[in-house]
Amino acid sequence: MPLLDRNGAKDNAWIVSEDGTSDAEKIIVSFAHVKEALAGNGRGRRIGVIIANTVKLAELTPYLSEIDLIAIRFPAYGDGRGFSIAKQLRNAGYQGILRASGPLIADQFAYALACGFDEIDLPDAQAARQPFEQWIKAASSISQTYQRGFGTQNILDARRAARATGK
Amino acid sequence: MSVAKRPPLPVILLANDLLDGEVVFWTGQAWSDRPSEALIARDETTAIQLEAAAAQALAQNKVVDAYLVDVALDGKGHAVPHHYREKIKTEGPSVRRDLGKQAGQSNLANLGNLANLAPSGR
Amino acid sequence: MYRYDEFDARFVRERVAQFRDQVARRLNGSLSEDEFRPLRLKNGVYLQLHAYMLRIAIPYGTLSSRQLRQLALIGEKYDRGYGHFTTRTNMQFNWPRLRDVPDILDLLADVEMHCIQTSGNCIRNVTADHFAGIAADEIEDPRPTAELIRQWSSLHPEFDYLPRKFKIAVTGSAQDRAVTKAHDIGLRILRNAKGEIGYEVMVGGGLGRTPMIAKTIRHFLPKADLLTYLEAILRVYNLEGRRDNKYKARVKILVHEIGAETFASLVEEEFAKLDGPSIAADPEEVARIAAYFAPPPYEKLPARAPKFEAAKAKNRGFATWASVNLFPHKVPGYAAATISLKKIGEAPGDVTSEQMRVLADLAEKYSFDELRITHAQNVVLPYLKQDDLFDVWQALVAADLASANVGLITDMIACPGLDYCSLATARSIPIAQAVAERFADQQRQIDIGELNIKISGCINACGHHHVGHIGILGLEKSGKESYQITLGGDATLNAAIGERLGPGLDAEDVPDAIESIVAVYLKHRAPSEPFIETVRRIGLEPFKAIVQEKLHAPA
C-alpha cells in the first residue's frame, strides 16, 4: 500500500507481520502480539504496532518507550477517533513514528499532521484516485488555524508575536 | 451511491443534477428538467434500463441521488408520483407556487439563468 | 461587533479556495460523492428536494448592515430573492447552484462571513443570547466567549470528524434565552463566591430523536480554562461517542449511557493531563476579542421618552407593537425591538432581499449598524432610541415587517419541512400558516398571552418541537402526513421536554386541536397565569381529553 509523508511518496521500510514471526529488521505486529514481540526482541530489531482506533492510551502506555512506530487504523475516513489517539500519544510524550492506516482523503492530511501523524498508509485505490500531489497541495491549503498545540503555526501565537513586536 | 430498491411499476427515474441541483428525469436518451418528458417504465425490461441509466450517470458524475419513483398516469399520460414527497419534488414547494418547476423555472445553467421551461406538457 | 483582522481574513479566503478545489476534484472524480458530501456539508451545502441549499453562518446571531445587504444581494443574484433564518441563527438560501457556491463564498468573505461548519459532524455555529449586551440581568456579555469558541472550533484538526454534529450555546444572563440546556454543551456565565467570573458547564442536551436536557458537569469553570476544558470534553466524546448507529452518536447518548458523573470524571481526568497555558488563549487575546463588544456610544437620555409616549397615545397599532415586540434595555431611553418574521400567512423566518435592505437601512440609521438574529427566527434591532421607535415602526409597516406577535401564539418556530427539505417526513410551513390564520386576530393573541408553538417536519427536530409549549411533529403515517402534538415543553432555564397528547392528527385537524388546547387553558388559567404554568399546574389530562373528544366527534 502506498505510503506518504509531508514531503510526498515514501519508501516503506516496515513489514507488517501481525504475529511477529517475520525475520525482517523492522516489523509491525498486532496489538495482541506486541508484548511477546518486545520480550523476544533480543537482537535489537525495530518493533512497531498496528492498533484499532478503540485501543485506549492507558493500554499502550507500558510500551511507549520501546515501540518505534504506532500505526492507527482508520476504518473509514469519517471516523475521526485516530486523530484523538494520535494527539493523546503526542501529549503523553511519544516520539516514535505515527502512521495513519486506512482510506483517509487528501483533505484530512493537514489535520493528520497537526494531530501528530508522520505518515499515511493508503489503500491502492484511494491513492490512485487521489494522487499524492493533491495531498501535498491540500496539506498547505490553510496556512494557519486557530488552535494552539497543534503544530507550530497558529493564529493565536501569530497575533501574540505581532503584539510583542509592537505592531 | 447505489440505486435503491425498485418500487412497484410503473416507475420513472429522477435525480438531481450534480452541478446545478435541479431535479432531472431520464427520458430514455438524456436528462430533462421536465417531468412530462420522463420515460415511464411500465415493464421489467424498461425498469432495468432505467436502473442502468442511473448507474451510468452516477458513475459519470453527472447526477446525484438517482432513484426510481412509482407513478400514476394523469389524463395526458404524464407521470405523477404516488408519494406526496416525490410529488413535491417534481413540482416545487407547495407553499410557493411561484417557484420551481410548477412555475416554469429551472436551475440548469445551460438553459441560462433561472431559465423558463416551455409550459408544454403541463 | 467582532471584525476580522488579517489572520481571520486570510483564513476565510483560503477556505473558499479550498472549497473551490474540492468542487473541482468532485467533478474530475478524485472525490467520490460519498467523500464529497461531508466536505460540502462542512461548508454548509446540502442537497435538498429541489436544489442545493446553502447555510451561511451568522455567529451568535450578530450581523452588520453591510453583511445583511450582501445577503440581500446574494439572494437576488444567486437565489430567488429571499432567504430563511434558522433556529441556529443562520441564513439559508434554497436555490443556489453548486457551481456558483465558491463565488457566493467569496462574496461572503468580502463582508467577513462564511459557511464554515454550518453542517456536518463537527462543531457548529455557536449561538448566544440575542439580547447579549442589552439585558439588565446580564452578568457578562456572552459574545466574546462565543467568538473565542468560534475561532477555536473552526477547522479544528482533531474535532472535524466527530461521531455526530456538536452544538454549543452561551448565555451570560440569569434568564436563558439561548436554549442552552438543549445543546451538546451549554455554557452559563456566572460569578462564584469570590466574585470571579466563570462558566457552569452543561453537557448532553439535545433534541432530535431522543430529546435530553443537559446535565451540569462543572458548576464553576474559571474563565481561563475554557478552551482546555472544551478540548477535554471533545476528546472524550470523539473517542467514546458511539459510531455504530447514527441515531445514538450524539454526546447526549454517551452521557446518558455512562451517566453524567462518569462522563464528568473522564473529562476531568483528561483535563488534568492537559497543559492549560499551552492551549488557552492568552489574556491579551481574550481582551482583544472582548474589546470588539464594548457598548456602542450611547447617548445620555432620560428614562422617559416623551416622543415615544406621545406616539403610543396617538397610534393604537404602534402602541400594540411597542407593548408586544419591545425588550427593556439596560440603558435609559433605549429599547431593543424584535422584528417579527411571522406575518400571518408567511413562512416563518423567511425574509425577502428587499426586506433585508430595509432592515439593514434601519440598523444603520437607528441601531449602531447592528442586528441580531434570534433562534426563534426573528430579527432584533438592539440599540434603538425610544424616541426613534415610531419612525422605525412606520418603516417596518411599509415593508410588511410590523407584525405585533413576538412571543405570542402566531410567533411560531417552523423548520422548512418537506416543502424544501429532503430529510423531512411532512410539511411544516402550511401547518404554521393554517394555525396563524386561525389565530390571526390581534386582540385574541394578546389575550392568550405568551405561548410558543414549535413545528418540526421530521424527528430531527430542527423546529425545536420538543421544547415548544405546544410542539408539533410532522411524520408520515401510511402514505399521509400526520402530526403529533406535544405539550409542556420549555426552552428556558426550566427546560422541559413536551409530552405527547395522543395519536397523530391529519393536517386539517391541527388548527382545531390547537384551538381546543387553548380553550382548556383559558378555562383553567388563574389570573395572569401564562399557558406553560397552567399546563404544569393542571397536567396533561384535561388537554388530552378535549383533543380526543373533538377528533372523535361526528362531523
Image (cartoon, grey):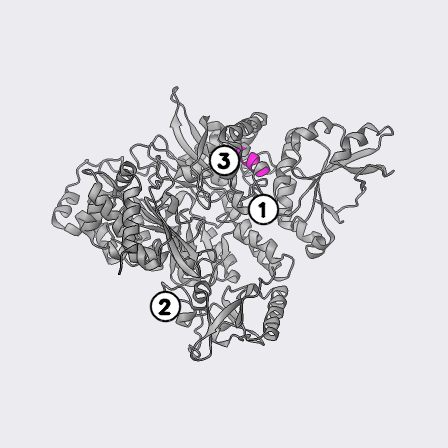
Q: Quadrant of the N terminus of chain C?
A: top left
Residue C466 in the image, given as x and y percentages of width and height: 39, 44
Q: Are marks 3 and 2 on the same chain?
A: no
From the image, tell me which residue sits under label 1.
Answer: A142
Chain label for disc 3: C
Whether residue A26 appears in magenta in the rendering, the answer is: no
Horizontal side, residue C300 vs residue A65: left or right:
left
Question: At numbered mark 2, what does the secondary structure look like: helix, strand or loop?
Answer: loop
Q: Residue C256 carries which label?
A: 3
Give the number of callouts: 3
Amino acid, disc 3: His
Q: Gap between marks 1 and 3, in whole Å?
A: 37 Å
Q: Name the residue under label 2.
A: B98
Tag of residue B75? none
The residue range painted magenta reads: C233-239
Disc 1 versus disc 2: distance between alpha carbons? 42 Å
